[in-house]
Image (cartoon, helix red, strand yellow):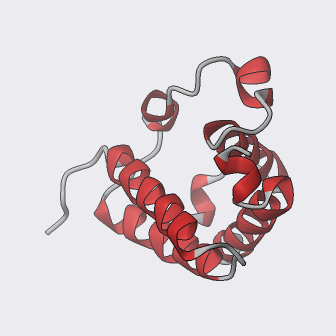
Amino acid sequence: MNLYEEMGGRATFEQLVSHFYALVSVDPVLRPMYPEDDLKAAADRLLMFLEQYWGGPTTYSEQRGHPRLRMRHTPFHISELERDIWLKHMQSAVNDLEMKPDLKEQLWNYLVMAANSMVNQPRGF
């Protein structure tokens, strides 16, 4: 069994993404960053990416190529503020998962590292 399966497979990542985007949909800072009226496309991309990263289906690469997360996020203003809000919503989603604590910690550590690497604007004053 790989990490994806140990974490609960597709159902776990669908729950994570659904919870996260429910919070983003009403967030005054993050919601405007998504040009789509419907967040479904963004949610689908995040789901595919997370599934692939943790050892699930490779649908993300098959449909979109190499993830290149930093490059894909350069058009968006991401400062420590946006990162912190993203992490707050993601923490809520992760906390809601039924998962072994060590796996949850591994998932969270990755998400923090990824969020930190997306910051592309200087600290505001």
Residue at the extreme front? 1
Where, by quadrant of the figure, is residue 101 drawn?
A: bottom right
Q: 33 or 12: which is nearer to us? A: 12
Q: 73 or 117: which is nearer to us? A: 117
In the displayed structure, would residue 61 be above or below residue 56?
above
Left or right position of 119 against 4: left
Q: Name which residue lies at 43% across and 34% down.
A: 70
Residue 112 can be seen in this image:
yes
Placement of the C terminus among the 4 image quadrants: bottom left
Residue at the extreme left? 125
Residue 27 can be seen in this image:
no
- Residue 102 drawn at (x, y percent): 51, 69
- Residue 18 drawn at (x, y percent): 78, 67
Q: 120 or 65: which is nearer to us? A: 65
Q: Name which residue lies at 33% across and 53% down.
A: 116
Where, by quadrant of the figure, is residue 2 drawn?
A: top right
In the displayed structure, would residue 42 be above or below residue 12?
above
- Residue 90 drawn at (x, y percent): 56, 70
Left or right position of 117 against 53: left
In the displayed structure, would residue 19 be above or below residue 34?
below
Q: 15 or 122: which is nearer to us? A: 15
